[in-house]
Image (spheres, rainbow, N blue to C red):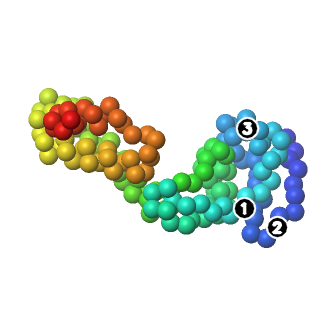
Amino acid sequence: MKRRTKRQPSGSIAADADQWSEKSKQSVAFQFDFILEYVDRPYACRRCAKACLFTAEDQKYTFEVKKASIDQRRKLCAECWSASHALKAKLAQHDARWAESKDVLRTNREFLSGWLELLTEWGQFEPYKKDVAKINMLRGLLDLE
């Protein structure tokens, strides 16, 4: 499909919507050529409130190379994003340990309180994706309710 092009203002980069993911190609933005260029988009980090910029270059890479959904918006600064991935890895390790040894770990207060601390910290990164069931289970096992 031949896409129309437009002269780019300085500080922007032409978008090549034909390089988007298949999901993004089903969007209204693709069907009606709504996004002809990427422009720098300022935002504040949801966790630390630091002023950040989702640059046009980053957008081109994110949407055309990594094939992220065109609806994606940045929410975390680079530092908080890295910290969130490290935290997610620790949570995955705890989940795996729990899955293989829950009978032993259910009385290990150090493990349980550490896991609860990690889950509580996760709420700073993803406030709408708290694992309430696990938090309540851990509180119950630690008799914190």
Who's the residue at 69% across and 40% down the image? 24
Going by the numbered disc 2, the residue's amino acid type is: Pro
Does the rendering let one see residue 17? yes
Q: Give how far apart the Cα atoms at labels 2 and 3 are.
A: 24 Å
Residue 75 percent across, percent down from the top left: 54, 54
Callout 2 crowding tier (Cα within 10 Å): few <14, some 14–19, many ≥20: few
The crowding category of the residue bearing disc 1, from other C-alpha atoms within 10 Å (few below 14, some 14 to 19, many at least 20), is many
Q: Split into 4 quadrants, where in the image is the N terminus? A: top right
Q: Earlier in the sequence, mark 3 or mark 1?
A: 3
In the image, is residue 18 above or below residue 96?
Answer: below
- Left or right: 98, with 28 as reference point: left
- Label 1 with label 2: CB-CB less than 8 Å: yes
Residue 27 is labelled as: 3
Q: Pick whichever, 106 or 69, lies toward us.
A: 106
Q: Position of residue 81 (x, y in %)?
A: 46, 56
The disc placed on residue 9 is 2
Residue positioned 73% across, 58% down in the render = 38
Q: Earlier in the sequence, mark 2 or mark 3?
A: 2
Picture coordinates of residue 12, whole percent (x, y): 75, 65
